[in-house]
Amino acid sequence: MQKIFLCVACLAVPTVYAAEPYLMNSVMDSIIVEEKDNSLFTHDGNADNNETSEPRMLANGQDISLAKEQGMQMPSDKTIIEEKRQLSKNTATTSAKLKALSKHSQWQHLLFYKNGKAEVISPDFYLTNPKPRSKRNFDPYAELMATIEQASNESVVCKYPARYLWLNHHLPELNSNLKDCPLLPDPNQEISLILVSNYLKNPASSFGHVLVKTSMAAEAEDSMSEEVKVLSSEDLLNNSYNFGARIPANENGAMYAIKGLFGLYDAGFSETEFFKQDAVYSKNEQRDMWEYVLNLEAFETQLLNYHLYEAKSARFDYYFIKQNCGYRSGEILELISDVKTTERIGPWYAPDYIFDQLLEHDSGTGSLVSSVRYLPSEQTQLREKFVQLSKPIQNIVNEVIRTENTAPLATLNTDDRALALDFLILHRTYKISHDNTPEQLAFKNELLSQRFALPASDGLAKLAVPNKASPALSNKTTQTKVILSNERAQVGLSLFVKDPLNAYTDIDKRFEAVQASLGYDFDDSKWTLTDFVFLDMQQIENLRQPLSGEPKLSWQLKTGARTDLFTGSNHSPYAQAGMGAGAKFGKHMLGYGMVNATVHDQDRHADIGVEFGLRAKRDTQSAELSYSASKREGRASITLTKLTLRQQLSKNNDARIIVTHSNIETHANYDALSGLDNTNASISWHHYW
């Protein structure tokens, strides 16, 4: 049956794509039916258009005179004509079907073919082998025919299991055998997308990260509904796929930024055990993760598992802003659903977008997400478990951490000592991930030897880590804002925003990148660029964190161009860095103080200042009060007090009232701005998309 189908399929090629000789290889030439002469002949060899005349050739291509000599029983003329007509009709039908299949969205997603261009740049991914990095001459139909032609080639079938699974689904006659491919993954594995929280210490991770994970479905029915997941050894051994740029060793930061922005790296999916990703993100960088388990039908699950296998051999151009981990992971997801995760206005793409689309997608047949599991980092687990220990145990644990002397443990009873040792072993493992020294290992071994002398206990495991909502529940990360006051109107655009006042975002982190604001002055009747922010980051560490040895230093960094308050000059470039301390008061309030240093292109080229802030938020409402003072040599100091009240209107819209008070102290040598004392109120609307 397979050979018959190949014969019929390939017969369509000269009819539809006769101008493509590269498809006419020796294999196809041997199975194409002769159709060059469609004339009918009489018994005496003269041409005749009478349908009752006897054809020179049978429908199967055999010479009629030779058939007579062999004593074959001849069919009637009408039968022969009808057979040839039916063959021609079947050929046309097959050709139309193959053309339609080549335009099918799933086939083109399997090929990473989008907007008339093949996106894979590695030379051996396509069977038709288009010129690398020049894929606009790529033809999905030609690739389909080349794939069908190789349907009996086991090595090709095993290299492209997703293609042949899909073709078997739409063309059962093809019947490609995938059972003889020993290296293929189990196609029935559960598939998850993992959102990794942002990491401000590395600009490449400031927007978060996306992983794809495959695993066997959990046996326990209630395990699927767990909000906070404890990773088992089996789960850690499951596979994961990570999309990233291939960066040379010892690449410096400046070159990484330039090449990443302008697509000078190539990138691809790498497959590895999930425990290696967990070690990097959860244990080394201390980043929380959220696992979105996909709700797929059996064929979709099989197709996506095989597609991930195929994607490992593909290489792409890498663009840090757009064609990044989120974009490529979302592109793979588009294979099995109508969710348009990669169709966005503008040349930027944040990893959060894929999860926004997952949560907002409504196909009418159920959600694409069966469950969301919180995977807390090692640091989060330590902090949350520590606050649940009794005060005496907390005090002794902190003393052991500070002094690395285990003598205080002897004052605890057996159960409490076992609990304290379990926590200290977990804490020492956490420390070793950052500082793997012989001294650290020796102290961990001492803790382990003391723990082995005590009875088994699950006290630490019973200290539950509370669930934390996914940041994807918050607003999208691109912001448009409009601000109105009695003096001016202002419009602004931010490409990437993590505002600590927004719902489901961390109150102790601020991140904004590539923000521009235009102001219209009502008195002067003109537009000016009032502010440009290239990067604005802030991390507040909690001084009230009870666990000893945790980070206490808060910091912030901001760079861009702005109106200089001391001189009034527009578009003055600057860079500001600050260090200080902060404290959390519960989960909904924090305060901080910073000492700032600013360099710029104005006179004296440097300022110093202080900044204090207080934030509070709960549910849909939040507020922030800040005070800053700046001093430049030879000029009066400037102070600015700002109060922001925010009300969330919907997931991606909020309204704010902003009150500012600025003051410039009078100075004998100061210019015309001297003695300025101004209070201004404005309202703003922020839309996220």
Image (cartoon, rainbow, N blue to C red):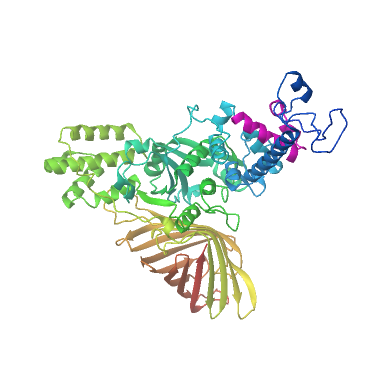
Observer-nearest of 283 and 193: 193
Whether residue 172 is visible to the viewer of this picture, yes or no, is: yes
Viewport quadrant of the N terminus: top right
Horizontal and vertical percent for residue 21? 76, 33
Q: State the count of labels.
A: 0
Residue 285 coordinates in the image, percent (x, y): 40, 44
Q: In the picture shown, does residue 106 fall above or below 146?
A: below
Residue drawn 76% across and 22% down? 68
Region of the chain picked out in magenta, as a range: 1-29
Residue 581 found in image quarter: bottom left
x, y percent for residue 392: 16, 50
Kindly identify the residue that appears in the image at 46 percent across and 72 percent down: 655
Q: Is residue 18 magenta?
A: yes
Q: Relative to 533, does residue 424 appear above or below in the rendering?
A: above
- Nearest to the observer: residue 37 or residue 100: 37
The answer to if 253 sits in the magenta stretch is no
Query: Vertically, is 203 above or below 682?
Result: above
Q: Which residue is located at x 53 percent, y 45 percent? A: 332
Left or right: residue 91 versus residue 491 is right
Q: Is residue 303 left or right of residue 411?
A: right
Front-most of residues 665 and 298: 298
Q: Quadrant of residue 454?
A: top left
Residue 325 visible here: no
